[in-house]
Amino acid sequence: MNCSECHREIDERSNFCSYCGVRLRPMFSHRRLMRSATDSKIAGVCGGLAEYLGVDSTIVRLFWAILAVVPGGIVGGIVAYLVAWVIVPKAPLPVPAAIQAKPTPAG
Ligand SMILES: [Zn+2]
């Protein structure tokens, strides 16, 4: 891979050019780990995690459920869920077009 600024050969996996320091990749992808506002059973943790990982939310829930069944995992699974609930921000609800249009006050 060549640097776009100084055109020197740099490591394929590096995020910055080691010669001129220019950023070679976007800092983060557009994806952010958030609790899903639309795909949620309890707090949207599994739905958000599924969106982030790009997998079906059912698979994440199933995995979480299996994790909770493992001896000693029940507490761990619940604690992990509660921790994720607190830490992971809630994604904003998609606002339907009908609510965005403000109704004119009658009378
Ligand atoms: Zn460079």
Image (cartoon, grey):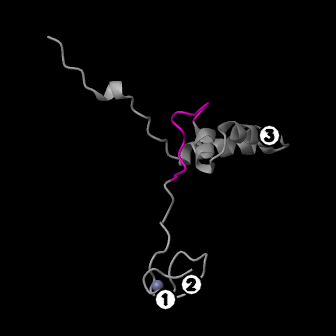
Q: Which residue is mark 3?
A: 66
Q: Residue furthest top?
A: 107
* Mark positioned earlier in the residue sequence (1 or 2): 2
Of residues 86 and 2, the one drawn nearer to the viewer in this rendering: 2
* Mark positioned earlier in the residue sequence (3 or 2): 2
Hey, what amino acid is under mark 1? Answer: Tyr
User: Looking at mark 1, is its residue's CB closer than 8 Å to ligand 1?
Assistant: yes
**Residue segment shown in magenta:** 31-43
Report how far apart the C-alphas of labels 1 and 2 lie in the structure. Answer: 8 Å
Hey, what amino acid is under mark 3? Answer: Ile
Hey, what amino acid is under mark 2? Answer: Ile
Residue visible at 57% across and 35% down in the picture: 43
Residue visible at 84% across and 42% down in the picture: 70
Q: Which residue is mark 2?
A: 10
What secondary structure is the stretch in magenta mostly built from? loop
Q: Which residue is mark 1?
A: 19
Residue 72: which quarter of the image?
A: top right
Q: For the C terminus, give its image quadrant.
A: top left
Residue visible at 51% across and 59% down in the picture: 29
- Above or below, 83 against 16 in this view is above
Does dot 3 land on a helix, a strand or a loop? Answer: helix
